[in-house]
Amino acid sequence: MQLKLVSWNVNGIRAASGKEGWSFFEDGKFDLIGLQETKASPEQLSDKLTHKSGFESYFASSIVKKGYSGTAVYSRLKPLKVEIELPDPTYQGEGRIVHLEFDRFHFFNGYFPNGGAAVLDEQGRPTGQFKRVPYKMGFFRSFLDYAQQLRRHKPVVVCGDFNIAHRPIDLAHPQQNISNTGFLPEERAFFDELLGAGFIDTFRRVHGDLKDQYTWWSYKTRARERNIGWRIDYFLVSEELSGAIVDAGIESTVTGSDHCPVYLCLDV
């Protein structure tokens, strides 16, 4: 059975659904759709968004702050089990994970934390630290530990906005960003650990070291027009699914958010 999966940080589902790029989802070619940064709870959404024809829908919403974070999954497949958030209560409340278990694999849609604002000293100068990097790294650790437990029984697929550019090839200006969250050594080292633990970056598996491939561009500097971006949105699969990867790619022409969708085809 061949499945097509897609992931998109929509930067607000209500705003994105009213833009031209939303039609990308309307032709029915996807079996699993993972959205991040929805910034809404189901009761704030139209029936069309909460009940997509032909799909079951699952939402994780922030309870710590309204209009913040949030994830959603639309699935043609009926899951065996649905979990919202990670099991560790430390990393619950922000609506960052929707986890579906299917017959042949576990599927995670995640909006992983960013590093937050810079920590300033008493004179207002940056210290090189970021307020949420400790939380971010703890969240990743909690996710990886849980995913490794699940892998003892069946493979894992994870998609979403990881808020990490893994290697210099994954952002336009690596040297200028070496001290910025999203490209910090400890963040990149964790991504190394994730791959070393047996997860595959499907885009790189399919395309190798293809350059200038990004999934996020800053609105502030009209960066998308110049393709000054970062690749921080991924589909990873555990190595048990290595032979099932048919295709993976980036839909950089789809607009409606400061991110673009990424997709994965699996033969499972």
Image: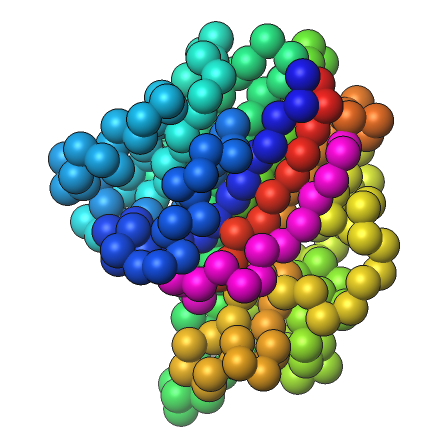
Q: Residue at x 38, y 62 (%)?
A: 256
Provide residue 244's location: percent of width, then percent of height: 77, 26
Going by the picture, which residue comes out furthest to the front?
Answer: 27
Observer-nearest of 120 and 5: 5
Horizontal side of 11 relative to 169 (left or right) equals: left
Displayed quadrant of residue 187:
bottom right
Instruction: Give the residues in magenta.
Output: 245-258
Is 130 rendered above or below residue 83? Answer: below
The C terminus sits in image quarter: top right
Residue lying at the far bottom in this picture: please name it: 123
Closer to us: 230 or 136: 230
Tell me if residue 166 comes above or below residue 75 in the rendering: below
Is residue 250 located in the magenta-colored stretch of the structure?
yes
Number of numbered discs overlaid on the protein picture? 0
State the residue at coordinates (26%, 28%). 51
Whether residue 212 is visible to the viewer of this picture, yes or no, is yes
Q: Position of residue 101 (x, y in %)?
A: 52, 16
Locate residue 245: give its quadrant: top right
Residue 215, by quadrant, is bottom right
Report x, y in % for residue 100.
Answer: 48, 21
Instruction: Residue 254: give x, y in percent of width and height.
Output: 49, 59
The residue located at (42%, 17%) in the rendering is 82
**Is residue 88 shown to the viewer in this render?**
no
Magenta region includes residue 141:
no
Location of residue 150 with respect to 139 vertically, above or below: above
* Left or right, residue 228 beside residue 74: right
At 27% from the left and 42% from the top, the residue drawn is: 62
> Which colour style is shown?
rainbow
Q: Quadrant of the N terminus?
A: top right
